Image (spheres, grey):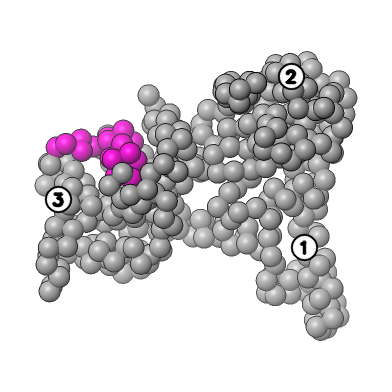
Amino acid sequence: MEFAERLESLAAKVRNQATAIGTEEATKNAFVMPFISTILGYDVFDPLEVVPEFTADVGTKKGEKVDYAIMRDGEVQILIECKPSMGALKIEHASQLFRYFSVTNARIAVLTNGVQWHFYTDLDAPNRMDPKPFLVLDLLDIDETLIAEIQKLSKESFDLESIISAAEELKYIGALKREIAAQFREPSDEWIKFFTARVYEGAFTQKVRQQFTSLVGKASQQFLTERVNDRLKAALGVSGPSHTGELPPTTSAEVAEADLDRDTEIETTLEELEGYQIVKAIACGEVKPQRVTQRDAKSYFAVLLDDNNRKPIARLHFNGKQKYLGLLDDDKVETRHPIDDLDEIYSHAEGIREAVSRYKD
């Protein structure tokens, strides 16, 4: 299997089992060891490659252990600290990593709960672990732009210098993307003032601030709407074999719900919204457009009837390298159909209409 396919396979396992894993040891066995072995390619049963419960005394601290140390040529290269999969990761959990980082040759430290993987290095000061990760991998929502960087840490392609040199850019790009998303959700005073100064010539008074707080928010929503509709026009300029009418328009409320008011850890992509509109266009042959809704989650993008998760029309699995359209039968058993292009959704129009007919009355 290709690297990205192995990553997606493990991600599918995480999606299916994460809620059933409650302890740190279970997390290690179910998710962390498979990541080390199948993704990074190290032999977890060879102490020359992977040392569990790695001990390195630090000053007066004796006998403390880091969960795993990955070795190359007799030297520690990567330290891994694990936490239970159901718990959120916090920098406070990395205290042992901080201490061990300074007394080993490791340049990469990893804090994980098996679902999220936070990768650290020493950009700020030599031999001192940075307080913020340069790369965050979420197996429930894989950012495909990071796959090549993760692969550099694998046994087969280990390229420490390359990933260290790219770490600063990765760190700041990730931080900027999160900040931009936060500003679209809830514009700060600085953001509002920045744009107001470019379109309004008067003094930036409290009254003007209040006025433009609303205007900047509306402009942001409309901008996203237009971007989505531009992508939809490009993707759906030629009608598919089962599409006979106009595409139901994307409303600013739909885009706002998908992109602004959702969980900050869930990223709705333009491609998912395009897929949603195709499914919606097909479904509108059976029901009114307003009854077809969407709800995004970490593991898939759901298209629902009447905004009811008991009435699934389809699921879009677009987070991995291979995209899938999921259709459920009468017993809610899902079948995933691989698609390489969004237009292929039209070839499953009959299954989509059957799903709508099942619930529409």
Determine which of the numbered discs, if any, sits on residue 217 in the image.
1
Mark 1 and mark 3: Cα distance apart in space: 52 Å
* Res 176 → quadrant: bottom right
What residue would you read off at disc 2?
Answer: 354
The front one of 308 and 128 is 308
The front one of 255 and 165 is 255
* Res 232 → quadrant: top right
Residue 177 x, y percent position in the rendering? 57, 56
Mark 2 and mark 1: Cα distance apart in space: 39 Å
Q: What element carries label 1?
A: helix
Q: What residue type is labelled 3?
A: Glu
Q: Which of marks 1 and 3 is nearer the N terminus?
A: 3
Mark 2 and mark 3: Cα distance apart in space: 59 Å
Determine which of the numbered discs, if any, sits on residue 75 in the image.
3
Q: Which image quarter is the N terminus in?
A: top left
Residue 84 x, y percent position in the rendering? 35, 52
Q: Which of marks 2 and 1 is in front?
A: 2
* Res 134 → quadrant: bottom left
| Position of 35 relative to 165 (above/below) | above
| Apparent side of residue 334 relative to residue 11 in the rendered image (left or right) | right
What is the chief secondary structure element of the magenta stretch? Answer: helix
Q: Dot 3, crowdedness within 10 Å: few (<14), some or many (≥20)?
A: some
Queried whether the magenta region covers residue 22, the answer comes back as: no
